[in-house]
Image (cartoon, rainbow, N blue to C red):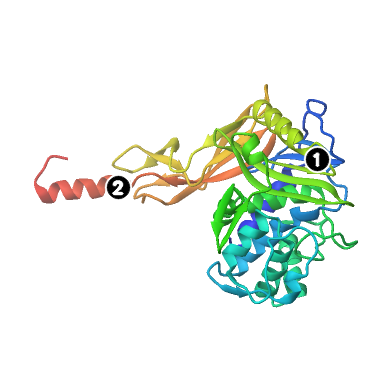
Amino acid sequence: MPKRVYRCLAFFCLLFSVLPCQAGAVSTSAASTILMDADSGRVLYEQNADARMLIASTTKIMTALVAIREGNLADTVTVKREATLTEGSSMYLREGEQLTLETLLYGLMLCSGNDAAVAIADHVGGSQAGFVKLMNETARELGMDNTSFANPNGLDDENHYSTARDMAVLACAAMENETLVRIVSTRSITVGGRTMTNHNKLLAYMDGCIGLKTGYTRAAGRTLVSCAERNGQRLVAVTLQDGNDWADHQALYEYGFSTYPAKRAAVLGETLKNVPVQGGLRPTVPLVAADSFSWPLAAGERLETRMELDRPLTAPVSAGTKAGQAVFILDGREIGRVDLLCGASVPPKVESAWNALKLGLPE
């Protein structure tokens, strides 16, 4: 995904995380929690979300994102001895074994293979240190200002930490990557001579769960980053140090989807307004949305739309020409914009009259 997309997503996630949420309507056992709408970045619930904490194997979301972005899924990776000696959860790699980068990514995200993380880092980054540099650069691009990565697998380190808010920003970016979504939503797969089963039990526990990543170390406790979709709306939940994470994530999603259903204010290609055209064969032209826009709204909240035209339209008008923007407002605050494009061509009246004259037809 291009860097400009990362920056745009981070901007929305960080800007709108300050909007108020309904505290007390849901609670968790976690030391740190956040529930975020993935498309808008609006925070729907948070508790201690900016505390810097150990994140264990949820680190591997960033490892996978960087590997997919910087590597080639079809590359053949030769496993080095160092990877096979990595402590903790494993996909049980063997020294000298050759696997595709894609197979290693399945081992990373389904089996939570610390050995896979090291093999991926060595291949894509040239070394673990080189790969960790890429991880931290990507974190800065996303606006994860309270995050530091020291390794690709999440093993405890004083220089390896993040926050629930930053991890939600990362998850939103990850959900924009189709390859990563395909991998983390897989429950079980046989590839590269291995059958691997996803550790993320939410895939089985609740309808609409897309996946993402579990984590655990003794110091970090249980960590979980997940994403779920309902009626076209995607939410991301993060819990850190949570001994009841499966139930807590389900409760967060029930709260989020029921309390903040997404209101679709614009649909790509659909007409938002018809505006006058001066001197045209037709008196008006439809203005269509150049992108879709939706926003999660609680009961009583009302989304307003203001049309801003760049200039009055004068024929000739060409279809696809930018004419202005639709501005979306909630409680007096601008929350987003979508470009408006002319949905049809409008020739000038004089051209129509001249063509009629040439053909001997009445005007």
Q: Residue 348, labelled with which disc?
A: 2
- Secondary structure under tag 2 reads loop
Q: Amino acid at mark 1?
A: Thr
Q: Quadrant of residue 204?
A: top right
Q: Quadrant of residue 38?
A: top right
Q: Is residue 197 left or right of residue 148?
A: left
- Secondary structure under tag 1 reads strand
Pick the residue in front: 203 or 148: 203
Figure check: 121 above or below 197: below
User: How many neighbours does mark 2 have within 10 angstroms: few (below 14), some (14-19), or many (20 or more)?
Assistant: some
The Cα atoms of the two marked residues, 1 and 2, are separated by 59 Å
Q: Residue 215, labelled with which disc?
A: none
Residue 322, given in percent of the width and then of the height, sits at 46, 50
Q: Are marks 1 and 2 in contact (CB under 8 Å)?
A: no
Pick the residue in front: 86 or 264: 86
Residue 161, given in percent of the width and then of the height, sits at 84, 57
Q: Residue 33, labelled with which disc?
A: 1
Q: Is residue 237 left or right of residue 76?
A: right
Figure check: 49 above or below 1: above
Residue at x 80%, y 36% (from the top left corner): 244
**Residue 7, visible in the rendered structure:** no
* Quadrant in the picture for the N terminus: bottom right
Closer to the chain start, of discs 1 and 2, is 1
Q: Amino acid at mark 2?
A: Pro
Residue 150, given in percent of the width and then of the height, sits at 82, 65
Q: Is residue 60 left or right of residue 203?
A: right
Figure check: 94 above or below 215: below
* Quadrant in the picture for the C terminus: top left
Residue at x 73%, y 70% (from the top left corner): 84
